[in-house]
Image (cartoon, rainbow, N blue to C red):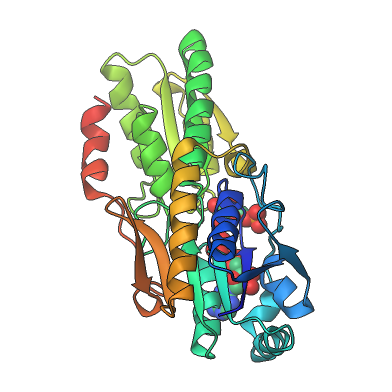
Amino acid sequence: MKRIAVLTSGGDAPGMNAAIRAVTRTAISSGVDVIGVRRGFAGLIDADFIPLGPRQVAGKIEVGGTFLESARCPEFKTEEGQKTALRNLETYVIDGVIVIGGNGSQTGAHALSKLGIPVNGVASTIDNDLAGSDSCIGVDTALNTALDAIDKLRTTASSHHRLFIVEVMGRDCGYLALTVGVAGGAEVIVAPEFDLSPDEVVRRVHKARERGKMHAIIVVAEGCVNRAQEIYAALKADIGAGFDPRLTIIGHVQRGGAPTAFDRLIATRLGARACELLLAGEHGNLIGFVNGKATPTPYSEVTGHKKPLPEDLIKLIETMSI
Ligand code: ADP
Ligand code: F6P
């Protein structure tokens, strides 16, 4: 291999820059040129390429988001879009591609790999919904950002005997809700994997009140579409619950900010390993963080597979909120 490309796709995640840096410096150290593709698969279709060297990735490890920029690109889901991308890879004599991104992006990378392009993926999404990675780049930062918000909301909740319903991101996966809920001491957690009706949440709030709780935090995953609003309406209508509810949607704040040390470290390890394997002729894999190591998993075992949530944490929710 003489020249490889690297791109970031889908939702940005803190640590993507550290992964680009790791890919670039690993390739250059082996005498291989690196092309940065701007705006994910859209840049592959438009041939929006920039050369990357060690200095172009300097001063980036501590910066959130992605300096290559990211995009959702519906055109890449079409045969025509993928063919245009293939033509550009040929024209610019690019021998392999590294795709840094989440579930959708890795499905796109898998498609490219099935067309015969050497591709490796790097697991990066705050949703943590990728089979083949215990933790994806960005999850730790997003979790700590959401936790900070919940800790701050608890200040007012306890001062005013209030109940806060907090909606967190994760698309259709409840990982962020589960982990931030347990870490933030939530009284109730609602996620697609263990959904609760608004009536059941109200019942649990009554019970918490009977046990002497004077304020409460309820974490709801965005994947339970409208559930946060429904719970808010049910509690507002239920004077008997005795709390004055408020609804907070944390939103894109969770995708922003400087990556934590953990995310910088896994980004460096996953990016470097994805590149080493690609240069060694091993491709068609997602490189994820498994049992503390950067580990390749064939795309056939990643895309279309659902990653289960940690069962032990789900079991602890009720006990920890008595
Ligand atoms: P994420 O990677 O964060 O999960 P998306 O699901 O939006 O984000 O996917 C990012 C991009 O990946 C899409 O805009 C599209 O370009 C590409 N992609 C997603 N699914 C497919 C697919 N089935 N085939 C080809 N490309 C896909
Ligand atoms: O995949 C990351 C994510 O932030 C999800 O948690 C969320 O559902 C989605 O992206 C939001 O997408 P957008 O930034 O396009 O609104």
- Which residue occupies the foreground of this view, 90 or 55? 55
Is residue 296 shown left or right of residue 8?
A: left
The quarter of the rendered structure image containing the C terminus is: top left
Q: Is residue 50 left or right of residue 218?
A: right
Rendered residue at 60%/57% (across/down): 20
Query: Residue 167: image x %, image y %?
Result: 52, 40
Quarter of the image where one finds residue 115: bottom right
- Residue 40 visible from this viewpoint: yes
Nearer to me, 23 or 68: 23
At 26% from the left edge and 44% from the top edge, which residue is drawn? 314
Residue 245, x across and y down, in percent: 52, 25
Tell me the quadrant of the picture where the N terminus can be found: bottom right
Q: Position of residue 60 (x, y in %)?
A: 65, 45
Q: Residue at x 50, y 39 (%)?
A: 141
Q: Residue furthest top?
A: 159
Picture mark count = 0
Residue 205 or 98: which is nearer the viewer?
Answer: 98
